[in-house]
Image: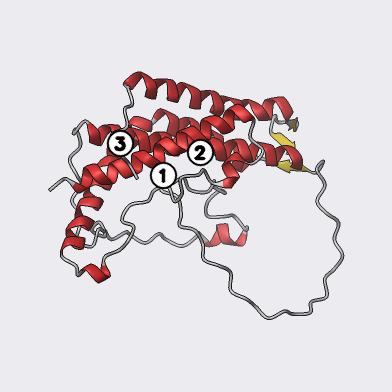
Amino acid sequence: MLTGPIRYASETLSALKLRISHYIQLAACFADDWGIFDEDGTPRLFRYDVRRLTSMVVRAEHFLRCAIILAVFERLRQGEITPRPFGLNGAPARTSRTPEPPLHPFAALRGIQKRDPAPPGFSVSMPSEAGPAKATPSLKVTRTPQRRARNDDVLSCDILLARIERLKIIRAEIDDRADKLAAIWAGMIVSRQKAVRATPVITRPANLFLPLKDWRPPPETTQGAPPNETEDLITLHWAAYNAAEGIAALCGRMR
């Protein structure tokens, strides 16, 4: 639990952004250093290098996630944020969306996709841990013998490159994202606190705000990372985890 306020000077956050930029730049240069280029200049990577670059991107995304949480804490600690209105159930009002028209018939006949493949979404709050897998009856399946994937298979890395470009955008938007997220989280926590006070003790939820689910970084972010990067990630994750508790404490005093 948070036993005291976390002191982050503005220059510390600035230094943190520079360090994150360094890790993003390492990922951005990876394809240039290790890629196999087509005639049109499109880089491809060995399967072995795709795994290495994927780990770098996952770590950079988590660096950004933690940095945004720290920036949100700073905004709320300075008292410069107005909470966004939420309902008593802690959910924002739903807005109706205009349904999209179906794919053009001629495009469907040609097998054209509605949209190009996109990288997986980026979220500051990490997903909850999945429950234990349910036992399933064993089935005897005749499997066709397959060779194991080779490390020298040449693979496309378009999605990874798109994630790297998104890293650069998120890095430039840390402050703007922190401003918006601080207002959203403050409104959500305040509304949930009001709901808890109006609810019998027995039915009160245990965890109201957990953007990071554990005090340790996710295993996929540190696996195979260089020692200095692992140390930076563990330190930043721990700071962000405590800052999240500070966010809940600060918002809990709002009315």
**Residue at numbered disc 1:** 124
Residue drawn at (59%, 45%) of the image: 220
In the rendered image, the residue lying farthest to the front is 3
Q: Which residue is mark 2?
A: 61
Residue at figure coordinates x 51%, y 36% from the top left: 234
Q: Secondary structure at mark 2?
A: helix
x and y percentages locating residue 109 in the rendered image? 61, 62
Mark nearer the viewer, 1 or 3: 3
Residue at x 31% of width, y 36% of height: 72
Q: Nearer the viewer, residue 29 or 218?
A: 218
Instruction: Find out whether the residues at labels 1 and 3 contact each other: C-beta distance under 8 Å.
Output: no
The answer to whether residue 227 is seen in the rendering is yes
Taking the image as shown, residue 177 lies to the left or right of residue 112, namely left
- Type of amino acid under label 2: Glu
Q: Which mark is residue 44?
A: none
Residue at which label 3 appears = 73
In-image side of 11 versus 194 (left or right): right
